[in-house]
Image (cartoon, rainbow, N blue to C red):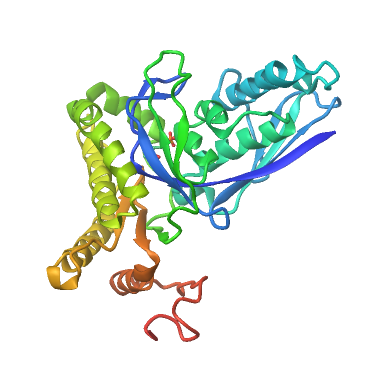
Amino acid sequence: MFIATTSAPVNIACIKYWGKRDTKLILPTNSSLSVTLDQDHLRSTTTSRADASFTKDRLWLNGVEEDIKPGGRMATCIAEMKRLRKELVENVDTSAPTLSTLFVHIASYNNFPTAAGLASSASGFAALTASLAALYALPSPPTELSLIARQGSGSACRSLMGGFVAWNAGTLDSGVDSHAVQIAAETHWPDIHALICVVSDTKKGTSSTSGMQRTVETSPLLQHRIKHVVPQRMKTISEAILAKDFDRFAEITMADSNQFHAVCLDTSPPIFYMNDVSRAIIAVIEEYNRVALLPENGGKRKAAYTYDAGPNAVIYAPAAHIKEIISLIAHFFPQQETFKDPFGLFGPNGIGTG
Ligand code: PMV
């Protein structure tokens, strides 16, 4: 029996991917850029085994077996990884066992609720790709593996690297230039934290796959976004990250989240991912930044919200402001459940003790 276990974290985009120019290869209509969250919090852990006694490829997600549909995304990723093993290891080293011919059993667990509307497919397909790469002892760097994770779920290609990661849309029909690259490592700007506000933990109404297809077919705003907005934003946000300019980073992140949701509204029939609570969180952060932008307060934004294809908010902020932001959110959106304070930010007596 051959076995390997790896894990991959969730990533949250600042410049959103929305739209495919090739649905089979998963080639996007625009480039995107995300922050990979810390391994300790939201991640998928995947174990892959290969054994001569196995009679077919099988996969379990959180203990429940999933159907691997022929020609589907999971089957494609597994087949591509076997192909790489054959090409890169077995063909050069004739003494290597022909692992690529054995069936695999794969078990994957998320350490967060799969239905919570968080990007579980990104961490899931990244962990699947990484565990097969370890099982097959592939010499491939993360950028090369990202070509395969991309074919499982587009955003998964960005979870193979830590820190700030761009997915370059590429121009080739083969997709070989549509891969992820690290803009800055996780050690570059550790001061930035992500606060995840779960507004609703029910499954989203319109899947990203069907939503994107409808947007590509019907939204004129998407065409403007692809040609005239995203290329400049990719450049400016990369510069802001390298310069650790949070004010600029926040401005672009919020504008891009808002344009992504505007594009969803511009789709026919329209898609609504945010709800009233999501919009109220936007209002709170906009007001917080309005005050921060006053010259007497330093004139710089202190937080950035962003929303994926669902109502949950992710708020990026420098460590110094996190406690204040949690207090604000807890004040405006009081919960029945006790607030969990994993970092001990609020001292032994909880929120309000300063
Ligand atoms: O990779 P998918 O199909 O789950 O699409 C993700 C799309 C967004 O989360 C809305 C944006 C992004 O870039 O992650």
Quarter of the rendering containing residue 283: bottom left
Q: Is residue 184 depicted above or below 346 in this figure? A: above
- Rendered residue at 61%/33% (across/down): 129
Q: Nearer the viewer, residue 174 or 274?
A: 174
Is residue 128 something that shows in the picture? yes
Horizontal side, residue 237 vs residue 204: left or right:
left
Q: Quadrant of the N terminus?
A: top right
Q: Which corner quadrant of the figure contains ligand 1?
A: top left
Extreme residue in the front direction: 243
Q: Is 344 positioned to the left or the right of 211 in the image?
A: right
Between 67 and 181, the one lying in front of the other is: 181
Q: How far across and down, in percent of the image, does residue 114 sit?
A: 53, 48
Residue pushed farthest left?
A: 295
Image height of 51 relative to 313, above or below: above
Rendered image quadrant of residue 57 = top right
Tell me: residue 203, above or below residue 83.
Answer: below
Numbered marks: total: 0
Q: Position of residue 127 (x, y in %)?
A: 60, 40
State the image quarter where residue 230 is shown: top left
How far from the left and from the top, in percent, is residue 297?
18, 72
Whether residue 270 is visible, yes or no, is no
Q: Quarter of the image containing the C terminus?
A: bottom left
Residue 108, horizontal then vertical, whole percent = 65, 42
Query: What residue is rendered at 69% in x and 20% in y?
Result: 88
